[in-house]
Image: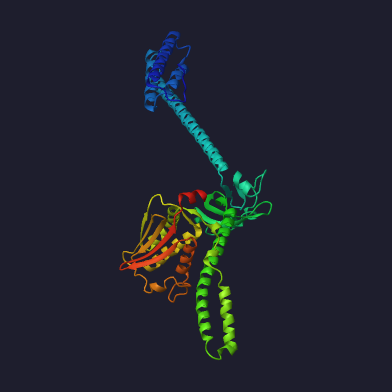
Amino acid sequence: MAIDLTDPVSPRNRAIILGSCALGVAALTLCERYLGPHIPLGGFFFLPLFLAAAYVSRWPIFVFAIVVALIREMFGPYPWANDGPTRLALTMVAFTGGGLFAGELVRNRRIALALLRKTQEESTLRLDAEQEARALVESSPAAVLTIDPAGKIAMANHAARSLLGFSVDSPEGHVVENYIPLLARLLKSKQVVRLTRTMVEANGRRRSGESFYSQVWVSAYDSASGPRLAAILLDVTEQLRDREESGLRQLLSNSKIIAGAVSHELRNLAAAASVLHHNLNNYPGIRQSKDFEALGRVIESVLKLSAADLSDTSEDILEGLDVAAILQELRVIISPRFNESETGLEWEIAEALPNVRANHSGLLQVFLNLAQNSGSVLRGRPEARLRIAAYALAESVVIRFSDNGPGISSAERLFQPFQPGASSTGLGLFVSRAIIRTFGGELHHTQRPGECCFTIELPALTAREGRGA
């Protein structure tokens, strides 16, 4: 049986060890009695005491030491008459003290080894956790940086090294202000301790001097040397460029639509003025008037200027769109605002709606304009509600925006530009109808007591058109 003084043993092994110690005491007592007082064996009695002390608690050690002292005195070679009480007392003190001392040494050894083992296990777990975290950070497609209190980059993963233009070496130890100046300013800010999962947009510079635009999620944490920053960066330069180009294209497209719609209105007015000018031509003597002649040239110029029409919008910007998907985008955009104003939103989107030929940004802009108009008139009204429904007809898709607002007093002038009393320039509904018309559809308004409704009707793509698109 292997004996390990540093680990607990089973009750069976403990019984065997204690029995062996008892036999050892008995054997030593017999040897001492046989050899006589001239060959002292008292020191050997400590061996079974020390061995037993490693496997029992303090009280059993104390009792066992007293029993050993009594047995040695009773069966030993020394007569009781010759200083027996004194010898017994000294033996008890020596045996109990030695046994307790040995027991404490073994217990302290066990505690020290247990703490050492626990420390080693914790160190191993900590090392494994650090390696896993490092592997996770290194494999992350997002750039991860940590900034020390001195404003230097303490750690940068592979994506961060690539983002900052380091192909071989690492930016660790470099001043972060040279690459992301905003992070250096945040670290020096008095509000740094409050930074927790804060998203900011920042300009950056690569090692080569090339600029880029990034979104940064920043959190601050404390260390022994001061506050540190952990930052996750995403390069959104391409997304920003695409967004600006898309916005510019949409602005140009809408500007063209507005120009065409205004030209159409100007042409109607100019045509009416031309008829009046022609009728005035019948009055005697008016032809000789220079002002009348100048008025004719002005009318002719306005007619030429208003030659553009809505049909000038190019068809190549249109594509087959899923109306349900665009309405889902609209839901994400407007829901927070409607929830804040406690205005109810009801959605009724039919399944398997056919695609429509339209421009994504333009159609979403019309939806957003109609929803915002309803939200403005419903704000503060009790039980306010906006219901958005979409369904398919034989050859078209219909989208309805109906609310329980007060309605529109001058519905006959609803789609005219520059209406008195309208918000901003009063072009919202005018432009919205113009955009829908460029898609080959129409925007209608109907109202009845307790309901104001705007209906968009767009031609649906047929199966052949869908394949051709």
Residue visible at 37% across and 19% down in the picture: 67
Hey, which residue is sitting farthest right in the picture? 208
Give the colour scheme shown. rainbow
- 154, above or below 34, in the image: below
- 63, above or below 293, in the image: above
Total numbered badges shown on the rendered structure = 0
Residue 63, image x, y percentages:
36, 23
Residue visible at 53% across and 71% down in the picture: 263
Residue visible at 45% across and 22% down in the picture: 50
Asked if residue 211 can be seen in this view, the reply is yes
Toward the viewer: 33 or 6? 6
Residue 13, image x, y percentages:
40, 19
- 285, above or below 413, in the image: below
Q: Quadrant of the N terminus?
A: top left
Toward the viewer: 189 or 61? 189
Q: In the image, 408: left or right of 4?
A: left
Asked if residue 379 can be seen in this view, the reply is no
Hey, which residue is sitting farthest top in the picture? 34
Q: Quadrant of residue 73?
A: top left
Residue 301, image x, y percentages:
59, 77
Q: In the image, 354: left or right of 211?
A: left
Residue 461, image x, y percentages:
46, 53
Hey, which residue is sitting farthest bottom in the picture? 285
